[in-house]
Image (cartoon, rainbow, N blue to C red):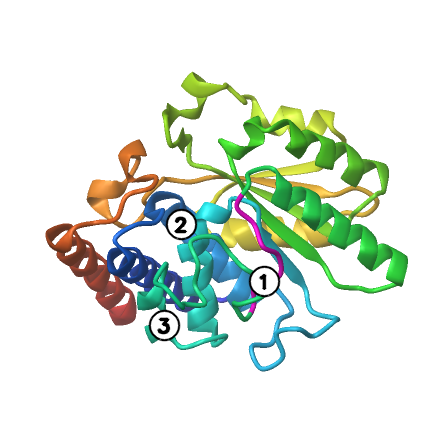
Amino acid sequence: MTETEKMGLMQTACKVRTGIIEAVHAAKSGHPGGSLSAADMFTYLYFKEMNVDPENPKDPDRDRFVLSKGHTAPGLYSALAHRGFFPVEELKTLRHIGSRLQGHPNMNETPGVDMSTGSLGQGVSAAAGMALAAKKQGKNFRVYTLLGDGEIEEGQVWEAMMFAHHYGLDNLCVIVDNNDLQIDGRIGDVVDPYPIPEKFKAFGLHVVEIDGHDFDQIAAAMEEARSTKDVPTAIIMKTVKGKGVSYMEDQAGWHGKAPNDEQYELAMEELGKQLAELEVK
């Protein structure tokens, strides 16, 4: 990846974060913390990695993305909007009556959403099914799914991993957003899933560990996933919950709470400064 490409991705990720704050503030509810921690990955997937076309969102040969941690829909919606699947201005309708942007992704309403999700643990199972269907149909598309680190406390996740390994789903890329926080606090204090990489290795997956805010590392991990054959790949990305908004960073309280007007203005000011600095560079 060139420095120009990386800078472009960093600018886009900042815009995606701005969209997250806009959406959650307008809704007066939602999940900003985990949306912000995954914003760089959302950006890389939709602006660099995945074969998708906003003009043809149902293309049968497109790559698929399943947001298994469906509560972080504001992050997915912001990436989709900035990619051109629907107007960015529509982000302000999040969770409003009649909006296409529900609190959790709805594949029947929202352009670019490949799977309706929200019940934790189920999305990754659907993604594994999509990957198997591609194999059976002789299709070359890849399937990406994003899980929360609190979500992997769900037993269904590990059933899906056994399934994916058994069927050799090397077209499946499982991404874990390891920001170390869930709604009730530190994941290690709720139901400790550590060590996370070793668990995925034990279930037969190829594992890559990265800094989830470093685009060079994200790019290298995706290349490694594409080149790995016969087994699925799990990318364990270390992130900061609330990344990009100082008062939200590494705070469990921002898992599922909207900023008030004053907090909104502060967040938008911080993100605006970050974007301006990136544009100068």
Instruction: Write down the residue under mark 2.
Output: 35
Instruction: Write down the residue under mark 3.
Output: 90
Q: Amino acid at mark 3?
A: Glu
Q: Nearer the viewer, mark 1 or mark 2?
A: 1
Q: Pointer 1: residues within 10 angstroms few (<14), some, or many (20+)?
A: some
| Residue 157 located within the stretch drawn in magenta | no
116 with respect to 192 (left or right): right
Q: Which secondary structure, mark 3?
A: helix
Q: Which label sits on residue 67?
A: none
67 with respect to 125 (left or right): left
Circle nearer the N terminus (3, 1): 3
What secondary structure is the magenta-colored segment mainly? Answer: loop
The answer to whether mark 1 and mark 2 are in CB contact below 8 A is no
Expressed as whole percent of the image width and height from the top left, the position of residue 246 reads 22, 44
Instruction: Write down the residue under mark 1.
Output: 107
Q: Please report the bounds of the magenta region as a residue range.
A: 112-118
The residue located at (57%, 46%) in the rendering is 68
